[in-house]
């Protein structure tokens, strides 16, 4: 049963990544490889914000986590717009082929990845917000609050995008 739960959790994470790719592809009509780099940059911005707030002792953990999450979202959004305006827009304006756009997105991904590694290093960084506690025992398996949140989030995002893509007036097919 634990392997089944782990598979559902991993599938939920993969589905969130895939939904991001689908959303971008449906709107700009090319495969944006730098998508993961943009998310990673947003995550590191959230990490940095959380650590700065935590070190200065301002607020409690939950408000700091909310502010850090919002900062990560803003940084990822601004970075995505900047990439589009600086890299992709000039290429689309010149009617670049899909292959050129794909190669450009790969170059942007490598650039973002190396820039992040330059500032943060290659080690894994974590935000410890509260003490680690044992998960819930369900049908002989253990599942944590974070894993439940991942599953619920992926289902909600899937449903929202399904409803949006069913409306041709909202998203061009």
Image (spheres, grey):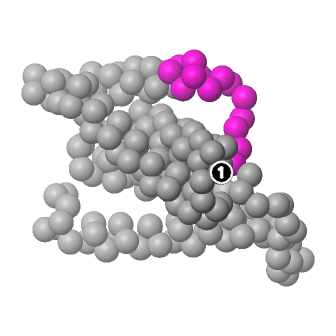
Whether residue 22 is visible, yes or no, is yes
Q: In this orientation, which residue lies closer to the viewer: 48 or 150?
A: 48
The outermost residue toward the front is: 57
Q: In this orientation, which residue lies closer to the viewer: 113 or 79?
A: 79
Q: In this orientation, which residue lies closer to the viewer: 8 or 143?
A: 143
The outermost residue toward the bottom is: 139
Q: Does residue 82 belong to the magenta stretch? A: no
**Picture quadrant of residue 104:** top left
Q: Secondary structure at mark 1?
A: loop
For the point 47% across and 72% down, which residue is it?
A: 156
For the point 72% across and 70% down, which residue is it?
A: 145
Q: Position of residue 147 (x, y in %)?
A: 69, 65
Q: Is residue 142 left or right of residue 97?
A: right
**Picture quadrant of residue 3:** bottom right
**Picture quadrant of residue 83:** top left
Q: Position of residue 121 (x, y in %)?
A: 66, 23
Q: Is residue 29 left or right of residue 124?
A: left
Q: How many marks?
A: 1
Whether residue 50 is visible, yes or no, is no
In the image, the segment drawn in magenta is 114-127
Q: Position of residue 89 (x, y in %)?
A: 17, 30
Q: Is residue 50 above or below residue 93?
A: below
Q: Position of residue 29 (x, y in %)?
A: 24, 43
The residue carrying mark 1 is 57
Q: Is residue 81 above or below residue 69?
A: above
Q: Is residue 123 above or below residue 74?
A: above
For the point 87% across and 68% down, which residue is it?
A: 134
Q: Does residue 118 belong to the magenta stretch? A: yes
Q: Is residue 90 left or right of residue 126?
A: left
């Amino acid at each position: 049963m634990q392997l089944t739960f782990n598979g559902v959790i991993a599938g939920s994470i993969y589905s969130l990544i895939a939904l991001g790719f689908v959303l971008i592809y449906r709107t700009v009509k090319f495969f944006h490889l730098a998508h993961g780099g943009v998310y990673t940059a947003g995550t590191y911005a959230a990490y940095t914000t959380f650590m700065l707030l935590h070190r200065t002792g301002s607020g409690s953990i939950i408000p700091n986590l909310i502010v850090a999450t919002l900062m990560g979202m803003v940084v990822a959004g601004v970075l995505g717009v900047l990439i589009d305006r600086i890299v992709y827009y000039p290429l689309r304006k010149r009617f670049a082929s899909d292959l050129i756009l794909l190669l450009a997105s790969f170059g942007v991904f490598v650039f973002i990845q190396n820039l992040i590694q330059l500032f943060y290093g290659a080690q894994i960084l974590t935000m410890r917000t509260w003490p680690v506690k044992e998960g819930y025992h369900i049908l002989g398996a253990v599942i944590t609050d974070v894993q439940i949140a991942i599953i619920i989030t992926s289902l909600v995002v899937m449903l929202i995008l399904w409803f949006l893509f069913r409306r041709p007036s909202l998203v061009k097919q």
